[in-house]
Image (cartoon, rainbow, N blue to C red):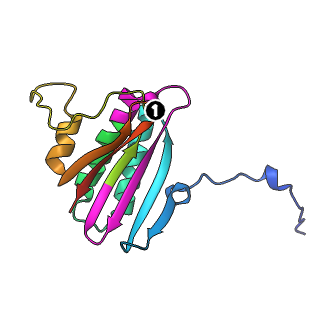
Amino acid sequence: MLEVRNLPRAALPQPAPSPTELIETTIDSQRGGMVWRRAFPGTLDQIPHARHMVRFLLGDCPRRDDAELIASELAGNAVRHTWSGHDQGTFVVEVSRTGQVVTVAVYDRGRGGTPRFGTRCEAVAEFGRGLAIVVALADQVGYEGSGEHGHRVWARLS
């Protein structure tokens, strides 16, 4: 005979959230597009998760690989060069898509330097090539914000 018992809810294991459950989605009705955002803890081990999020969201986009690499570079800069990488720090990855135009942006917590696009770097340099890679891949780049309050650093692909 089968015995049935009611177990308290807390005793049951809870599944780990899937990437889609952690992503905030908004509809940009003025431009007919979508915007996705997700906050990540400000540690280097979270950068692959940011890459995977971008790859997942842009599964049918011809520039998906470029967008994924851009997200990785911008997230790495946020963690390495701003307060995002300090205790309790976070960074936010935002992916916007309107038609064939994709914008990848990373928000940091500030206290870092201002992003310098267009700075030349040596091909053999071990550091300092991230923004040069972003500039090479993107059709447009830019940033808003300040070192005091944080930045939104973005790259647009069309």
Q: How many numbered marks, from 0 up? A: 1
Q: Which residues are magenta?
A: 77-103
Q: Pick the residue in front: 61 or 37.
A: 37
Q: In screen coordinates, is 9 left or right of 60? A: right
Position of residue 67 in the picture relative to residue 40 (left or right) = left
Residue 97 placed where, x, y %? 34, 65
Kind of residue at badge 1: Ser
Query: How many C-alpha atoms fall within 10 Å of the one at disc 1: few (<14), some, or many (≥20)?
Result: many
**Residue at the image position 40 percent from the left and 47 percent from the top:** 50
Percent across and percent down for residue 79 are 40, 32
Q: Quadrant of residue 107?
A: top left
Between 120 and 125, the one nearer to me in the picture? 120
User: Against 29, is 118 above or below?
Assistant: above
Residue topped by disc 1: 84
Q: Secondary structure beneath disc 1?
A: helix
The correct choice, above or below, for 83 with respect to 60 in the image is: above
Query: Which residue lies at the image location 49% right of the left edge and 26% below the top edge?
Result: 86
- Residue 56: within the magenta? no
Q: Quadrant of residue 88?
A: top right
Above or below — where is 21 with respect to 133?
below
Image: 86 above or below 12: above
- In the rendered view of the protein, which quadrant contains the C terminus? bottom left
